Amino acid sequence: MSVTTRTHRSRRTITAAATLGVVLAGGTLLLPAPAAFAESAPQAKLTVQAPASVGFAGQPVEFTETISNPTTEAAGYHLYLDTTSDLGTPRDAIVIDYKDPADGAWKSVPLEFAINEAAHYGGMLPSDITVPAGGSTTLKLRIGAPMGRPHDGASNGGFQSIDLRSAVSAIDGSHVALDQSTRTIGVDSISTSLAHVPATAVAGGAPIEFDAVLANPTLSDYINVGNVLFTDPHATVQVRKADGSWSKLAQVLPSEPGTRPGVYLEGRDSSIRTGSTTTTRVRVSFDATTPAGDTELSPCVFVNEGEDTPFRGTTNCARGATVKVTAAAATQSPVPTPTPSTTAPTTAAPSASAPAPSASATRPPSDAPAATAATAGQLAETGAGRAPALLAAGARPRRSHRSHRSHRPGARPVGPGLRGPTGRAPADPPSESMDRCDRCTPSPSESPPPAPPASPTPPGTRSARSGCAGSTCPSCRRAPGPSGCCRSPTSTW
C-alpha cells in the first residue's frame, strides 16, 4: 500500500499538465486536463467491509476499505467518508479514525457536523492514496459512536443506526466519484440487569442477596463505565469479592435534591470488553428505621461521567426490582401455660339433637380489644382450635378453662395472660373437678354394671343415666361422653 501524507489546501494546485478553465472569445469553456501522471482516464473500484454494528457510547470498531486500480498506470486517489443518522444525533457523537501506515498510529479523520433533514458527519482522509497499476490498496479504518468526549458524555440524544457512505475520487481536483459504497451500521448497547432478587426484606433483619449483571453484546469495548445500583437511603449494599469476603460500598448522593443515592458496583471508570459479561453478587440490608412498604432497586450504567459530576453522562438504565420491606416483628412476652381447672360448671347439658360445636373460635365482638382478636388467631394457628379433632381421634388432652370457654356459644375467647374488656384478667373458676375426661377401660374380669331403670327426664335435658346402657364406665353415676369418654353429668359439650 502506498499512501502519501500531505496537507490539503482548500484548492489543490497539483495539476502540472492541467490548466484552469479559460473562457475564450467565443465563450467556449475549456475543462481542466487530467493529472500529469495519469494519461488515461482515472478508474477505481471501492470495496467496503463495514462492521455490522457499533456500541452506543462505546469505543470505535475496526473495518477496512480497499481501493483497486484497474488501469495500466499508477494512480492517486482521495477517500471521502460521510455518515447519516437520526436528527437526535448530537455533536461529537460519531468518530472515524484511520491507521497511518507511516507510523502505525491511529489518527482522526476531520469531520464536519451538519444538520439537513438528518444529521451528517463528513470529511476526507488527509492523505493521498497511491495505488499501483492493476493493484489495490487496503486502508484500515474504524468507526464509533462515543456520544461525546472522555468524561464528557452526551446525556441527551441518540440514534438507531448509521449510514456510512464512502466515495473514491481522483486527485486531479475533479472531485468526481469514481466509485462509492453505502453501508448501514447498526447501533447496539451494553445492558445492565438484576437477577434473582427476593420479593421481600425485613427492616433490621438479614440482608437479601441477588446478582447484578452487566453484559456487553456489542462489537465495541467500553471504558469510563460506571455500573450503578440506586437504593433506599436506609440500605447498606455489599458486594462479594473474589476471595469470598464482602465489601461495603459507599453511597454517592446525586447532585439533584430529592433523588436516591447510588453505589458503584465495580467502581468508577471501570471497563468491559466486547462480548463479555460481568456478574456481581450483591447483598442489601435495610436498617430498622426503614419505612415499611415497597422500595426500588434500580440499575443504571453511565459512560463518560463527568469527573466532578457523578451520574451525569451517557446513560442506559434498566427496569429494576421492587422489594417489599416489612417491619421487624415485635418482641412477644412468653405465653404462660394455662392451669387445668377442676370445677364443674353448673349449666345444663344441651339436648342430644344440638349441633356439634365449630372448630373455630367464636368471633369476638367489635368492641373487644384488637390484641384479643389477634391472639385468638395466633392460638388457632398454633393448634388451639384443633381440640375437637384430637378428641375424636381418641386422644386424652386436658381441657383448660380457656379452651372450654372458647367453644361455648356466645363466649368471648380471651387468651392466657391477656385482659378482658374490663381491663382485668378473667377470674379462675372454683378448683373442683369440672371438666376432666377419663376414658374408662374395664378389666377383662370386670363386667359393666346393669343399667338402672330409666327415670323420666324433662325434654331438652340429658340425665346422668341417659345412654348409660352398655357403658364401659365402672360407675353409672357418670354419663358416657364422645368416643367412650366418661363425663360429669353436669358438663356441657
Image: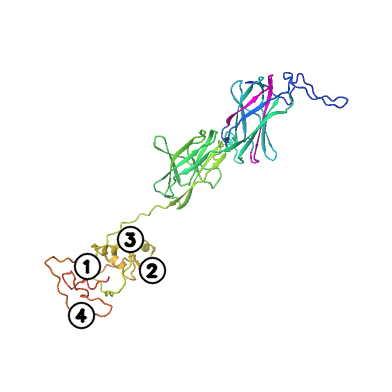
Viewer-side label of 1, 3: 1
Give x and y (percent) for residue 166: 66, 31
Query: For the point 42% across and 53% down, which residue is it?
Result: 327
State which quadrant residue 98 falls in.
top right
User: Of the residues under marks 2 and 1, which one precedes in the sequence?
Assistant: 2
* Prevalent SS, magenta region: strand
User: Of the residues under marks 2 and 4, which one precedes in the sequence?
Assistant: 2
- Using the rendered image of the protein, determine whether residue 436 is visible from the camera's viewpoint: no
User: Of the residues under marks 4 and 3, which one precedes in the sequence?
Assistant: 3
Residue designated by label 1: 484
Marks 1 and 3, how far apart at CA: 28 Å
Residue 365 bears which disc, if any? Answer: 2
Viewer-side label of 4, 3: 4
Magenta stretch, residue numbers: 60-89
Residue designated by label 4: 455
The residue lying toward the viewer, choosing from 31 and 90, is 31
State which quadrant residue 146 falls in.
top right
Number of residues whose C-alpha sits closer than 10 Å to that of mark 2, classed few (under 14), some (14–19) or many (20 or more): few
Viewer-side label of 2, 3: 3
Marks 2 and 4, how far apart at CA: 42 Å
Callout 4 secondary element: loop
The residue lying toward the viewer, choosing from 156 and 206, is 156
Viewer-side label of 2, 1: 1
Question: Is 37 situated left or right of 318 in this image?
Answer: right
Callout 2 secondary element: loop
Amino acid type assigned to the residue bearing label 4 in the image: Ser
Amino acid type assigned to the residue bearing label 3 in the image: Leu
